[in-house]
């Protein structure tokens, strides 16, 4: 157990620490329905790689500040509050009347000891946490009341133009809808990521007025108020935000941009896996969500979908046309043209083609599952073979079991599910129906076409409809071909 360090002797100089950083909270704007999406679902809830786009923004906000984000929503986006109830705090903007009014609603919900906010847009899912930290640090380092992000771009349209004064400070931002033709030639554009001193912001927001053209309250008009107060307003300029194709601070407005952003994010994922030692054949035809984990030396073929909390061990091969969701796959497995949902597959297993492992399937090491075989809420022991055309549900199957073609565990009696148990080394003949609850003992057999309605003792044989229990006939000795006369 470590010892407590001794107290310094009298007369030693006190330890001097740096200034305490301000408490910073991220405010995420998510009050707009997003009419260009042409959807009843709020824009920020549209999925990207299996998660709502807003989830990525909240991740960056938490990482950058260490605090729960504050999400501004409206009556039209009430679902946002329901989806993220455990991940964020919320402020209601009664009417979506612009970004300035949204931040006004956020200030009313902020804890009183918050000294700084960063403002993010809920429809910019690729925003890096490093950018959020940088814009806040830039504001503090310059003692400015406001910092915005901008970059020079000669092709982009739809963004506000940033006017820089002779002193290097920001003088004003002109929204494109309000800009004259000459003002639209300005190529310094506002990227919509801000940091504010909260004390100043509380005094400045009531002075914002409505735009005569749109009737909205623009947050960007705070630049002019800050300069009028004699306070500093600075810009953090991104020299190049295009290294990830399209810009990390590019927002999503319609379904075409949604699909484009998802493709960029997916490409980032597959590129990172290839650098980490995963073999991806025709990688941009493979869909991998960010929650998936792949070990080195995994091999993935085209037209594979990997979703949710899926983990795949080293040396495993996932062949074309497989979809794997929330499943764990061990090492040296092969999955071919099959669907796995919430399943566990241990090492050295072969699955497919055209198999279906449903929730609760647990496949032991060395198992072989063939075409048109289905397993649901069942455990298959080591080296068991279920090669084709069979259904095993609500079952406990031992090791080294052979499950013949057409086998069914009839687990549902119309009211409740029942369990089938098959012991080690059992042989289940083709077209056997096991009417649960039933147990087939260790080393027992069922004859082809049998309907088993009662337990089969170890080593016995069940034959017929309904099956009768018989002694197993010993296998004849193989002929030696010699004359014994």
Image: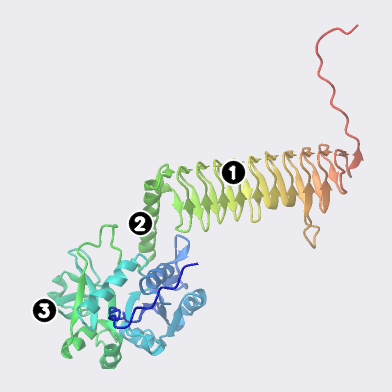
Which residue sits at x=40%, y=54%? 269
* Circle 3 SS class: loop
> x, y (%) of residue 188?
17, 70
Which residue sits at x=49%, y=51%? 305
Quadrant occupied by the C terminus:
top right
Disc 2 and disc 1: Cα gap in Å? Answer: 33 Å
Residue 38 appears in view = no
**152 or 167: nearer the eye?**
167
Against 45, residue 212 (above or below) is: below
Indicate which disc, 2 or 1, sits on the residue closer to the N terminus. Answer: 2
Which of label 2 and label 1 is nearer to you?
A: 1
Disc 2 and disc 3: Cα gap in Å? Answer: 36 Å
Label 2: few (<14), some (14–19) or many (≥20) C-alpha neighbours in 10 Å: some
Residue 84 appears in view = yes
> x, y (%) of residue 290?
44, 58
Q: Which residue is mark 2?
A: 264
Q: Which quarter of the picture shows residue 139?
A: bottom left
Which of label 1 and label 3 is nearer to you?
A: 1
Q: Which residue is mark 3?
A: 165
Q: In this image, 386 relative to 86: left or right?
A: right
Q: Which residue is mark 1?
A: 347
Label 3: few (<14), some (14–19) or many (≥20) C-alpha neighbours in 10 Å: few
Which residue sits at x=25%, y=85%? 213
Indicate which disc, 2 or 3, sits on the residue closer to the N terminus. Answer: 3
Q: In this image, 136 relative to 407: left or right?
A: left
Q: Which mark is residue 284?
A: none
Which of label 2 and label 3 is nearer to you?
A: 3
Indicate which disc, 1 or 3, sits on the residue closer to the N terminus. Answer: 3
Against 311, residue 50 (above or below) is: below
**345 or 416: nearer the eye?**
345
Which residue sits at x=43%, y=84%? 91
* Circle 2 SS class: helix
């Amino acid at each position: 157990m470590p010892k407590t360090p001794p107290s310094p002797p009298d007369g030693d100089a006190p330890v001097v620490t740096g200034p305490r950083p301000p408490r910073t909270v991220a405010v995420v704007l998510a009050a707009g329905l997003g009419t260009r999406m042409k959807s009843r679902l709020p824009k920020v809830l549209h999925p990207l790689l299996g998660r709502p786009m807003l989830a990525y923004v909240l991740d960056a906000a938490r990482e950058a500040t260490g605090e729960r984000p504050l999400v501004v929503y409206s009556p039209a986006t009430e679902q946002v509050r329901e989806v993220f109830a455990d991940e964020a705090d919320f402020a209601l903007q009664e009417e979506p009347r612009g970004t300035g009014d949204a931040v006004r609603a956020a200030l009313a919900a902020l804890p009183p000891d918050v000294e700084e906010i960063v403002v993010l847009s809920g429809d910019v899912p690729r925003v890096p946490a490093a950018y959020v930290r940088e814009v806040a640090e830039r504001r503090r380092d310059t003692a400015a009341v406001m910092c915005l992000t901008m970059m020079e771009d000669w092709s982009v349209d739809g963004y506000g133009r940033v006017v820089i004064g002779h002193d290097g400070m920001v003088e004003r931002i002109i929204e494109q809808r309000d800009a004259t033709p000459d003002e639209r030639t300005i190529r310094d554009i506002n990227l919509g990521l801000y940091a504010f001193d909260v004390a100043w912001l509380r005094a400045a927001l009531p002075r914002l007025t409505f735009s005569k053209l749109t009737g909205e309250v623009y947050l960007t008009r705070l630049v002019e108020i800050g300069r009028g107060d004699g306070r500093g307003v600075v810009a953090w300029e991104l020299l190049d935000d295009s290294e990830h194709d399209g810009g990390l601070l590019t927002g999503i407005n319609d379904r075409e941009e949604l699909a484009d952003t998802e493709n960029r994010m997916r490409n980032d994922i597959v590129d990172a896996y290839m650098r980490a030692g995963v073999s991806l054949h025709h990688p941009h035809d493979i869909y991998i969500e960010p929650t998936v984990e792949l070990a080195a030396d995994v091999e993935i073929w085209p037209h594979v979908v990997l979703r949710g909390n899926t983990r795949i061990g080293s040396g495993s091969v996932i062949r074309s046309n497989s979809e794997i969701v929330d499943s764990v796959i061990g090492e040296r497995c092969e999955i071919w043209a099959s669907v796995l949902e919430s399943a566990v597959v241990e090492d050295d297993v072969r699955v497919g083609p055209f198999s279906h492992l449903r929730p609760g399937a647990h496949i032991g090491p060395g198992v072989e599952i063939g075409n048109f075989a289905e397993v649901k809420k069942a455990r298959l022991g080591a080296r068991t073979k279920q090669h084709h055309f069979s259904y095993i549900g609500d079952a406990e199957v031992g090791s080294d079991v052979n499950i013949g073609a057409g086998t069914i565990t009839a687990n549902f009696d119309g009211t409740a599910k029942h369990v089938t148990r098959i012991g080690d080394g059992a042989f289940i003949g083709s077209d056997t129906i096991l009417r649960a609850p039933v147990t087939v003992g260790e080393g027992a057999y069922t004859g082809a076409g049998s309907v088993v309605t009662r337990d089969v003792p170890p080593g016995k044989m069940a034959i017929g409809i309904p099956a009768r229990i018989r002694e197993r006939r010993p296998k004849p000795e193989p002929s030696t071909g010699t004359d014994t006369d």
